[in-house]
Image (cartoon, rainbow, N blue to C red):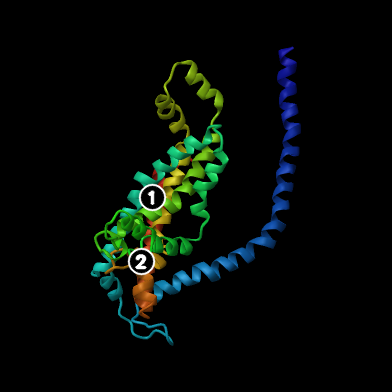
Amino acid sequence: MSQTSSISAPRALSARTPAIARRKSNRVRGTWPVLVLFLPPALLLFTVFVILPMGEAAWYSFYNWNGYGLPTQWIGTKNYELIFNNGAFRQALINNGLIILVSIVIQIPLALWIATMVTHRIKGAVMFRLLFFLPYVLADVAAGMIWRFVYDGQFGLVAGIFNAMGMSAPFWLADRQVAFYAVLGVIVWKYFGFHMMLFVAGLQSIDKSVLEAADIDGATGWQKFYRVTLPMLGSTVRLSVFFAVIGSLQLFDMIMPLTGGGPSNATQTLVTFLYSFGVMRMQVGFGSAVGVVLFVICVVLAFSYKRIFMKND
C-alpha cells in the first residue's frame, strides 16, 4: 500500500507541475499589456516632474543665479558654505529638531491616549473622533491665519482672556523668546488628529480575545496596555513616528501665515528658510542649495529609519 502511494505521489506532482507553470506563464503574459500601457506614462511624468527638477536644482546650486536667463556665474560649493555659516539656517535646523522632538514626545503619546479613549464603546465616541480629527482636515494656511488671530495681543482670543482678568495681553508671536513655543502648540493641535486616527485603526485591528484573556488572567488596565496593546501596536507606532519626522521636515504652509518665519527668524523651518532666503530674495542658486540639503536630510532620515526600525514591517 505504501509502495503504491510512493509511486502515485510523484506522478501526481509531475502531472500538476506543467499546469502550475502554464498558469504562471499566463499571469506573466497578462501583466505585460498592463505594464506597456501604464508604466511609460508614469515613468515619463515622474521623470519630468521629479527627476529633472531635482537634477536641475542640484546643478543650479553651484551657480550664483537670480533666476533670470541662463546661469553663468559658477561659484562651486560657495552656496553650501553660505548655508552652514548662516545663523538663520542653524536656527531653522534647531527648530525642525524641536518640532520632531515635540511630535514624538507629546503629539504621538497624546494621540495614542485619546485613541484609546474614543475606541471604547462610549456614548458619543464617533463624535469625539470627528472633533479631534477636524483640525487635521482644516487647511494649513487657514489654521495659521486662525491662530494668528487667536494669539493677537490686541484683538484676539488671548487678548480677550487677559483683558477679562484685568491684565495686559501679551504679544506672543512678536516675542522672539516665546513665538516658537506658541507655534509648537499649534502644530500639536493641528496634527495629532491624524496620528489619533492611525492608532484608532490599529486598536480596532487587535483581536479582542487577547484582551479578554488578559482580563481573565487578572491584568490591570495599565498592564493590558503596556504588555498587550502597545506591543501589538508596534508597527502603527513606528509608522506614526515616521510620518511625524518627515512631516516636521516639510512644515511650511502653516508657518508662513502664522509668523512668516519671524520675529527675527525665530520660527524659521528648513522649508520657510528656503522660501524666505531663496525664492523671495531671488537667490535661486542659494535656494537650490538649501533644497538639496533638505532633500539629503529627508532621504537619509527616511531610509535610515526604515532600515533600522521598520525592516520587519
Instruction: Locate the N terminus and report the quarter of the image it occupies.
Output: top right
Whether residue 102 appears in this view of the structure is yes
Residue 251, horizontal then vertical, whole percent? 41, 60
**What residue is rendered at 55% in x and 46% in y?**
130
Residue 54, horizontal then vertical, whole percent? 45, 69
Q: Amino acid at mark 1?
A: Ser
Whether residue 84 appears in this view of the structure is no
Q: Is residue 6 left or right of residue 125?
A: right
**What residue is rendered at 43% in x and 49% in y?**
242
Residue 26 lies, with reference to residue 43, above or below; the image says above
Residue 62 lies, with reference to residue 312, above or below; the image says below
| The residue positioned farthest toward the top in the image shown | 1
Of 177 and 238, which appears nearest the observer? 177
Q: Which residue is mark 2?
A: 259
Of 169 and 1, which appears nearest the observer? 169
Report, in whole angstroms, how far the alpha carbon at label 1 lies from the one at label 2.
32 Å
Residue 72 image-quadrant placement? bottom left
**What residue is rendered at 39% in x and 72% in y?**
275
Q: Which residue is mark 1?
A: 304
SS category of the residue bearing label 2: loop
Chain-order first, disc 1 or disc 2: 2
Q: Is residue 295 left or right of residue 267?
A: right
